[in-house]
Amino acid sequence: MDNRRDQFQQYYRLFDNVKEMTQLWFETQNRWIFLRSALVNLNIKNDDQASLKQIYIKFTEIDESFRNFQKLAFQNPSVAGLAKVEMNRIHFKTWLHVFDELIIELDFYLNEQYRSKFGRFYFLSNDDLVNLISSGLDPRFYIPYVRQLFKGVHNIQFRLPEQNIGTTTNQTMNSAAIDVYGKLFIR
């Protein structure tokens, strides 16, 4: 009887460890995905983005170790085996802590650079704001965000200036800058 009780307690501890590890892994991977996509989508080439460059450098330092762990986990997909290794829990907690710090720094950067200059950006999540900033000059990508920021806007029509219509096709393909004038229909 005691043997079964001991065995049951071992399984209980193992399942508890698996639960904790999968929760840590889930939280860490979600933050990693957000930071990775945000830092890839934001164009970090300007000298005035020193704080964003620092966030990117910190992220790349830890990104490699997290990706190596992902590869090892893929090669040995035993969750129970991963849950038994105490070092994995320490790694997850470290990664989670660093990712949380980087998200706070990114939030500060977004508030400083964008939200403070246009208050309606406070209504967008960090993920939406990063997507909006990184969507480039194609106005079609702005539509969902315009609807979020200006509740009365139901339709947007974009047109090119009349004087540029003849040369627009070649200019559009060869240039990143295009003047677009939009009509907003507000009900």
Image: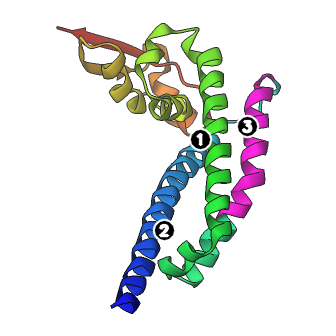
Does residue 10 sit above or below 53 in this rendering?
below
Query: Residue at 61% of width from left, 49% of height from top?
Result: 96
Would you say residue 161 sits in the magenta stretch?
Answer: no
Answer left or right for 156 relative to 22: left
On residue 41, the disc is: 1
Answer left or right for 155 relative to 23: left
Residue highlighted by disc 3: 55
Q: What secondary structure is marked by label 3?
A: helix
Looking at the rendered image, the disc whose residue lies closer to the viewer, 1 or 3, is: 3
Does residue 168 sit above or below 18 in this rendering?
above
Gap between marks 1 and 3, in whole Å? 14 Å
On residue 170, the disc is: none
> Which span of residues is magenta-colored?
48-66
**Residue occupying the far front of the picture:** 2
Residue 123 appears in which quarter of the rendering?
top left
Q: Which amino acid type corresponds to the residue marked 1 in the rendered image? A: Asn
Gap between marks 2 and 3, in whole Å? 32 Å
Q: What secondary structure is marked by label 1?
A: helix
Q: Which amino acid type corresponds to the residue marked 2 in the rendered image? A: Asn
Looking at the rendered image, the disc whose residue lies closer to the viewer, 2 or 3, is: 2
